[in-house]
Image (cartoon, grey):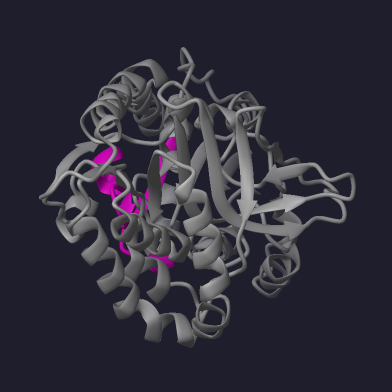
Amino acid sequence: MRLVFAHDHIFRRDDDGKIYSGGSYNNAVWERYLKHFDEVVVIARLEELSHKGNRIYNEFGSGRVTLKPIPSLSGPIKQYTNKKEAERIIRNELLMADALIARLPSEAGNLAVDAARDMNKPYMVEVVTCAWDAMWHYGKIMAKIYAPIARYKMKKRVGRAPYALYVTNSFLQGRYPNRGVNVSVSDVEITDIKSGKPAKDDGIWRIGMIGSIANKIKGWDVALRALSLLAKKGLDFEFYILGDGDDKPFMREAGRLGVAERVHACGVLPSGKPVADWLDNIDIFILPSYSEGMPRAVIEAMSRGCAVIGSEAGDIPELIDRSCIHKRGDYRKLALLIERVMDDRDYWHVLSVKNLMKAKKFMKNVLDESRDRFLADFVSRACSKGGQIAL
């Protein structure tokens, strides 16, 4: 059986023709679907990558996973000028496919869902974040204008989808309810839980964060402002951020706030062990996001015994200790929360142990079992019949 997977993710191709992903789309992700389908065709964007520099990407694909690029649908102009070509590519791939999985929110996913419904192809949606939050906090005025439209598009398509997989326990279900068959399964990949953090034996606190610096959705601007307050108090720390994007604007802002010498942009690492090893050197993990679904980075940090501080976005409050939550954009509260952990090593140790215990329910084998049951049901009830299930 042949599956089409649609999302707005940007893959990158180097001068040798190899394709890479700077995000979470490593080959382990495709294995989720290859258990149930013989072939996966990924509909997404593709951009050229002249050099990787200090950024290490996930190499894309295998013999059973291929990429079919579509033109960019980012912004109202490209949605208008590139829509027909994108629709043509999506429909051609669906003609040869048995089913569609569309990851939402995404414009490619929206087009693919509409095409699948029109062609009576079985489909399901994966609901991974809030379209409103992602647009509203993107940082550009056009994104704010588009936010209510994006929310409407997503709510309509999630609501009538025959099958929906949510990555959150309740947050996205509340904002984008589904009338079909649905399940909650995080898309995190935790294969190993650290036995515990060693006792802290030096005075330098290593603060870490994972998230793209290409825009401000993950709240790196909030992080830098909070760190600036800590630096003015004379606290001893180093800040490390792992994520894709041009680090020049990020470092300029760090310089303006007087913390550039303490800040390190670490580029990108492949998912799995390289990220886990990086987190093993972090004492306090922060994620001051404006928008989240189920934050994979938080769970990964918890699995390595980090104390975790985060915003109220998405399912972050369901994961971490309530004493470690701040309102979106509240850099003063974030600074106070970090300072509290620095001042009390017993508190840091308690948070570390609690996070390790909670991370166990996100182990890969546990999540795979739930996801496999759901996908098997989708294949047997929908795909084997060759058409959609009426709601």
Instruction: Estimate the x, y position of residue 296 in percent, counting from the top left.
Output: 43, 40
Residue 380 vs 68, above or below: the answer is above
Q: Which residues are magenta?
A: 307-332
From the viewer's side, name the closer residue of 385 and 112: 385
Residue 66 vs 243, above or below: the answer is above
Instruction: Estimate the x, y position of residue 175 in percent, counting from the top left.
Output: 19, 60
Residue at 16% of width from left, 52% of height from top? 178
Pick the quarter of the image with the N terminus.
top left
Q: Quadrant of residue 361?
A: top left
Q: Quadrant of residue 45?
A: bottom right
Residue 185 vs 92, above or below: the answer is above
Q: Is residue 311 magenta?
A: yes
Residue at 29% of width from left, 57% of height from top? 117
Is 55 on the left-hand or right-hand side of 277? Answer: right
Instruction: Estimate the x, y position of residue 95 in percent, counting from the top left.
Output: 46, 49
From the viewer's side, name the closer residue of 113 and 269: 113
Instruction: Estimate the x, y position of residue 286 in percent, counting from the top left.
Output: 47, 48
Residue at 25% of width from left, 73% of height from top? 152
Evaluate whether residue 237 shows in this view. no
- Total marks placed: 0
